[in-house]
Amino acid sequence: MSKEHKESDQSEKFKLTTEEAIELINELKKKVNETTLNFPQLGKRVEFNVYAQKDGTKFIINISRNTIDKEKCTYQGRTYINNIPLLRLDITNSTHMNSNGEKIKGNHLHIYNEETEMREAIPFNVEDADLYEYCLQFFKKFNIIKENWEIEYQTEL
């Protein structure tokens, strides 16, 4: 087997089908470690695990804050095994360009699919939301149930 063929096999091994990704996103998940999530300050990031209620499959959640723009934030849910991003919410003032030329101004949601992985996005807005509310909406989209834990959120002055 050629080196080129081996590399191709390797990358294919770590892909999911769109159906598998949607199934993973839709599984009910819960946070079982600490009961408090300290929302990151500017320029910081927090990472924690959540687990599928059905079978204990582990997922990783990241929340990353921009260094300068206090309203910019990224929420991401990914698989623990193979580290595949499944869902990402970008809170931003910038524009995202999809491959078909569609421009999305502002907040947008990336949902994994086998053809484009995470390159495509759809608009995502919540009326009168702050970063805390967007966090809750992301948790809802990723099916994380809020059970006996709270988010410590402090806005910067």
Image (spheres, rainbow, N blue to C red):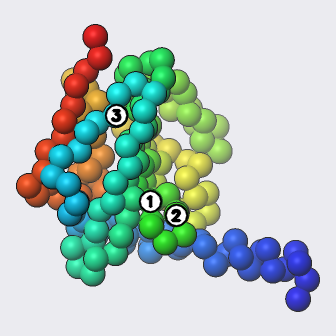
CA neighbours of label 2 inside 10 A, class few (<14), some (14 to 19), many (20+): few
Image coordinates of residue 13 in percent, x first then y, are 64, 78
Tell me the number on the disc at residue 83: 2
Q: Distance between the residues labelled 1 and 2?
A: 6 Å
| Residues at circles 1 and 2 in contact by the CB criterion of under 8 Å | yes
Checking the image for residue 40, the label placed there is 3
Classify 46 as above or below 3: above
The quadrant holding residue 122 is top left
Q: Callout 1 environment at 10 Å: few (<14), some (14 to 19), or many (20+)?
A: many
State the SS at label 3: loop
Identify the mark nearer the N-term, 3 or 2: 3
Q: Which amino acid does label 1 sit on?
A: Arg
Whether pointer 3 and pointer 2 mark residues with C-beta atoms closer than 8 Å, the reply is no
Residue hosting label 1: 78
Identified at 50% across, 32% down, the residue is 104
Could you say which is closer to the camera, residue 146 or residue 48? 48
Which class describes the residues within 10 Å of circle 3: few (<14), some (14-19), or many (20+)?
some
Rendered residue at 91%/83% (across/down):
2
Query: Tag on residue 55?
Result: none
At label 3, the amino acid type is: Pro
Q: Looking at the picture, tell me which residue is in the foreground, 6 or 148.
A: 148
Question: First in sequence: mark 1 or mark 2?
Answer: 1
